[in-house]
Amino acid sequence: MNKLFILLILLSSFIYSQDSTKHLLINLPSGINVNLSGKIEFEYVDVEGKGGSLNNDNNLNQEVQTRSPFLRIDKAVLKFKAIYTKYLSLRFGLRFNDSNAYLDRIYLLYQNPNHRLEIGRNKPAIALSRKIEAYPLIGTAFWRGRQYHIDYEKQLSFFKIGSSLSLKRPLSFKAPLEDNSFPMLVYGNMPKSNKDWDGVTTELGIRGEFGIGALSILGWGYWGKLYDDYDWKLLYDQFTYYREEQGEVSAKNANRDHYWMGIRSELDLSYFFTRGEYVFSKDGFLDRNGFYIEIRKLFNPLFLSKKPVLFLARYGGLNIEPNGNWEAELNSPHTWNRSLLTIAAVYNYTEHLKIKFEYYIAGEKTGDKKEIAELDNNGEGRIYQPNISDNQLLIQFDLTF
């Protein structure tokens, strides 16, 4: 709690400097105007339970990285928009955190009222902008990672249709929550090293969206092949049941099937917003599916001078269900079925300062068996862990400029 108090004091100096001014516009000697904006996220994270060596239980097979509360700069982003014409611009972002700095997204965008063409590095077009910090489980698994693509979209009355040709993102592992424990299988970011591009494949995507009044429905599908041979070897090495399903094969005969499809519906009324999404995928012999349902509402409470407060509740899951006959393994978190309940409130102190309060109730089906736990450690036994105690609290200051 002392760390949280210090964070509040440090950030108070930023609060009163926030106003409604427009983004900074820089005129370069070439005559091109560059729009500059940015964002900083400071956050406090607390995983349930007590930290420190006195509270460590060495009789656990799986444990979170730290149960002690911690503070960090989650990210600082500078966003640039180079404006060439009314409809054509180059957009990119520089991203910084406590340990790294890198070029995040970069893409050329042509956009008019009826057409949108994007070329560069960005998330898939079906990805969502978040109102809170946490992603849905299927968001982290399927559409959070960046890709290189050519994406086109056309507006047709009540319909939008789109297609993309991209370099397929490699399979990777990423934790779903803020403490970075228990990573799951995801479509990651594109490789940074040239040697990691060996065997890269392409992915074709199509989508269609129907919208009328408060209702919109979006459906999509992406098809390609697993990397040769990084992707299928990762599955082979990391999933016991995958090895049993495929057996010993050469690269020529490996199963490299790959696709992921989904549907999302939204209802946006004046008094509340609700969204549901379902995704299923196939990577070689590995099948996954997941969903979430989200409800949110904006309030203007009198005791907060009618400044808007957003309340959000979301529940979702992600399942590893290849042919229905695979089992989770305690030692391999990427084999676990998961659920996540997120409860959040976002207070808009000013137009450029949001304070986010989020609580995550995580569920994991680890595949642990009581009889195995009793026989572990040379017969001395260990704690039975059919699930993990890793619910988390997040308090974040989100400042834009």
Image (cartoon, rainbow, N blue to C red):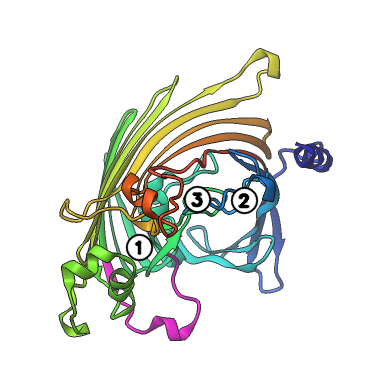
Circle on res. 60: 3
The amino acid type, in three-letter code, at marker 1 is Asp
Segment tinted magenta in the rendering: 188-203
**Relative horizontal placement of residue 266, taking residue 351 as reference (left or right):** left
Q: Secondary structure at mark 3?
A: loop
Residue 131 drawn at (x, y percent): 52, 39
Q: Which one is earlier in the sequence, the residue at label 3 or at label 1?
A: 3
Circle on res. 151: 1
Quadrant for the N terminus in the image: top right
The amino acid type, in three-letter code, at marker 3 is Leu
Q: Secondary structure at mark 1?
A: strand
Q: Residue at x 38, y 43 (%)?
A: 386
Q: Is residue 193 magenta?
A: yes
Structural crowding at the residue carrying mark 2, measured as other residues with C-alpha within 10 Å and reported as few (<14), some (14–19) or many (≥20) = some
Q: Residue at x 60, y 39 (%)?
A: 49
Dot 2 corresponds to which residue? Answer: 66
Above/below status of 161 relative to 157? below
